[in-house]
Amino acid sequence: MKIQRKLNQLSYLGKGALNAYSQVFFSDNPWFAVLLVSATFIVPASGLAGLAGVLISLLLAIWLGYDKALISKGILSYNVLLVTLPLGLYFKFGYVLILTILFASILTFFLTVALRGWMMRYRLPFLSWPFLIGLWVVLLAVRQFSGLELSDQMVYDWNHLYSMGGEPLVVGYKWISNLSIPPAIVTYLTSLGAVFFQYSVLGGLLVAIGLLIASRISFLLSLVGFFSAYLFYAIIGLDLNALNYTYIGFNFILMAIAVGGFFLVPSAASFAWVVILVPLVTFITVSMEGLLGVFQLSVSALPFNLIVPLFLFVLQFRLRTPRLLREVYVQHNSPEKNLYAVTNYQERLSRKTNLLFQLPFRGQWTVSQGHNGKETHKDDWRHAWDFIKTDNQDKSYRDSGFKLTDYLCYGKPVLSAGYGVVEHLVDGIRDNLPGDANTRQNWGNTIIIRHDYGLFSKYAHLKTGSIKVRIGEYVAAGQEIAMAGSSGRSPEPHLHFQFQATPYIDSGTLDFPFAYYILKEGTSREFRSFDRPGLRQNISNPEVNQLLANAFHLIPGQKITAICKSATEEKQVEWHVETDIYNQSSLTDPSTHDRAWYVNDGQVFYFTHYEGSRSNPLYFFFVAAFRIPLIFEPGITINDSIPLFISARPWMRWFQDWIAPFKIFLKTRYLLNYMEIDQDLDPEWVRLNSTIVHELSGDQLDKITVRMEIPRDGLIALEFEDGKGTRKLTLTER
C-alpha cells in the first residue's frame, strides 16, 4: 500500500510538472508539454533552472497542503517556471543562483496564490501576472547581488547544443538556421520560442509543432494574432524589426489564443475580436516600452496581461450574449473541446432546468390557448396555458354542450406540477354555466404553489368545493389538488396554468418549460424535453416503466461486472458507481481510470461526458445508452447527438478542427427505439434498439446498431453490430 501511495504521488507530481509547461498555452496536452520541456533545454542551464522552479513550487504546494487536483493541473507552477527560466539563462551557475531560484520560486508561488484568489472574485484569470511581478522584482533586486555573475549562455549556443546532442544536433540546427525562411516566419517562430526565453528558430519550431499537435484552432489563432500585428505594424509605420529584436510578438499570439479559443468559444466573432484587439495590444506595447525602459525592464507579457482581463471584464456587463460570442464556463483546456462541448450542450441540454415540472393532469389533454394567445394570454400574462380534453373529433364536449358535465375535462383531477408548498388559494366561487363568464372574479377558484424562491405555479378556474389542500401544506409532484372547473372568467370548463415569480393571484407569468411530455400529432408520437406545448397540441405525461427505472437506478458504491465478447477476445472488467462532492455521478473503470458521467432524474437516464479509451467496454455502454427515457413507447424515436471530441474518428476530427469555428460538417447522431415488451402490466423483459450514426455534411458514413435486452433480473445484455463484426456486452451487479 505504501509503494502504491508513493507511485500515485509521483504520478500526480509528474502530471503537475508537465502541465506547468503546457498551461502557458492554456493546454493540458502531455505531448505538447514534452516538446515544450525540450525547447527549454536548448540552453540547458535555462531548462534546468525552469525545471527546478517547477519542482520547488510542486513540493511547496504539497507541503502547504494544497488540493492534489489543483497541483496536478500545473496552475500553481507555470508562473514559477516563467520566472526561473531566464535566471538560468542570464546568470552563471553557483550557490547564489541556486538561492535566487529557490526564493524567487517561493515569492512567485505566493504571488500566484494571492492573485488567483483576488482575481477569482471578479471572475477574471490571473494569467501570468505573478510572473511579471515576480520577474521584475527579482531582476531589480539581483542588480545588487555582487555574488551573482552574468552568464554567456546566449553567446555560445552551438557549444550548448553540442553538449546536448553532439554533432548531429549542431548540424541540424545549422541547417534550420541556413534555410531561406521569410523574415515574417522567422519572427513568428522566434516569438513563439521567446515565450520560454528561447530566442531561436529551433525553439519556436518545437513550440509550433507542439501547438499544432495540441490544438489546430490554437495554432490557427497564433497565426491570425501574430500576422494581424505584423500587418498593423506595417500600416501604421512601426519598425517591423521591433517584433524580432524585442521578441514581444508572443503577446499577440497569447492574446489570440486566450480570447479566440480559450476564454471564449471559438467562432467567427471570436476570431474577429482577436484582430480588433491587436491594435490595443500594440498601443500598450509601444507606450510601456518607454515607461519601463526607465527602469531597464522589458515589457515582456504586460500587454497580453492587460488586454485579455480588460476585454473579459467588459463582457461581464452585457445584457445579452450573442450566439457567436459566448464565454466558456466549463473549461476543457482545448479550444476544440470547448467548442464541441458547448455546441453539443446547446443542442441537447441548454433548455434543461434544475426543477422538473410535469403536466398538471392525467391522460391526454389539448392546449386550447397557449403562449401569446389570441384571447387573454397577452402582455404580462402571455406565458400561460389553457388546457381542455377533446375527443377523436377534436370536440371538448359531448351531447349539446349546454351542461357543465357535458365537457370532457369538467371534474377531472388537477395535479401539482411539482413539489412545493401551498402559498395561496381561493375557493367558493361558483362555476359558470357554459357561455357565461364571471369577470369580477377573474381567476375563479385558484391554487398557488411555491416551488422555489421566485418560482410559483398557479391553477385557476377550478371546480367550486373541489380543492383538496390547504395553505402551508406540502404537496408532491403529481398529487391531486383539485378538479377542473369553470369558475371566474371561464366561458367553458378548462384549466388555466402558469408559472409566475410572485405569490399573488394577479401575478404576471414566467416563461418556464415542462420537463417531459408526450406530444401526439395524428398517428405520430414524440417525446419532448424541457419544452412548451403549443396551440391545439395533444399532450400527456410520460409513464415511467418500472423495469427500465430499476435497471438504470445506479447507487453510489455499487459495483458492476461487464463482460465484453468479440470474435477474437473476451474481456471482463469491473465498474464502480461513484458520486463526487459536487453530486456528479459517474461509472468508473478503476483499472484504467476511464470514466463516464451520467444523470438520472427519475424520468430519463443520460450520459453527459466521457473520458478514456474508445476501446474500453465502458465507452461501448456510453454510446449505446447515451440517452434513455425510462418509458416504453413503441413508435417513438429518441434523437440526440454525441459530442464530436468523444465520438468522431481522430483523423476526421483533425480536419474538422481547422474550420470548426466557422462550420461543423461532422456529426454523431444517436437514435433510440422502443422495440418490444413481453407484457404491459408486469413485464419480464424489455427490448430497445439504439443506433449511432456518423455523418459528414448530412450524409451517413457508417453506423453502429445496438440491440439491448433488459430483463427483470437486472442482467443487461447488449449486442453491437458495426458492419465489421459483432460484439456482445453483458452487465450484472457484482
Image (cartoon, helix red, strand yellow):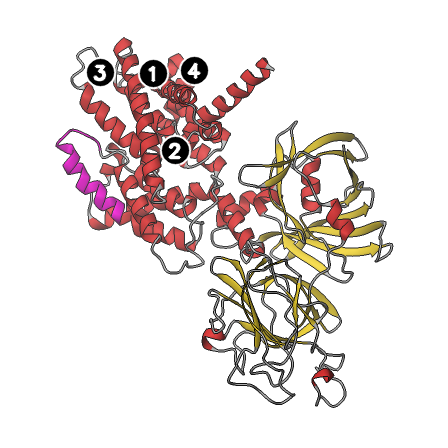
Queried whether the magenta region covers residue 493, the answer comes back as no
Q: Which mark is residue 45?
A: 1
Q: Mark 4 or mark 3: which comes first in sequence?
A: 3
Q: Amino acid at mark 4?
A: Gly
Front position among marks 4 and 1: 1
Query: SS of the residue at dot 2?
Result: helix
Q: CA distance from mark 3 to mark 1?
A: 13 Å
Q: CA distance from mark 2 to mark 3?
A: 27 Å
Q: Which mark is residue 24?
A: 2
Is residue 229 or residue 672 the one in the foreground? 672
Q: Position of residue 401 (x, y in %)?
A: 71, 88
Q: Judge from the rendering whether residue 35 lies leftward or rightward of residue 588; answer left or right.
A: left
Q: Amino acid at mark 2?
A: Val
User: To which quarter of the image does residue 113 belong?
Assistant: top left
- Which residues are the magenta region? 280-298
Q: CA distance from mark 2 to mark 1?
A: 20 Å
Q: Mark 4 or mark 2: which comes first in sequence?
A: 2
Q: Judge from the rendering whether residue 158 lies leftward or rightward of residue 494; answer left or right.
A: left
Front position among marks 4 and 2: 2
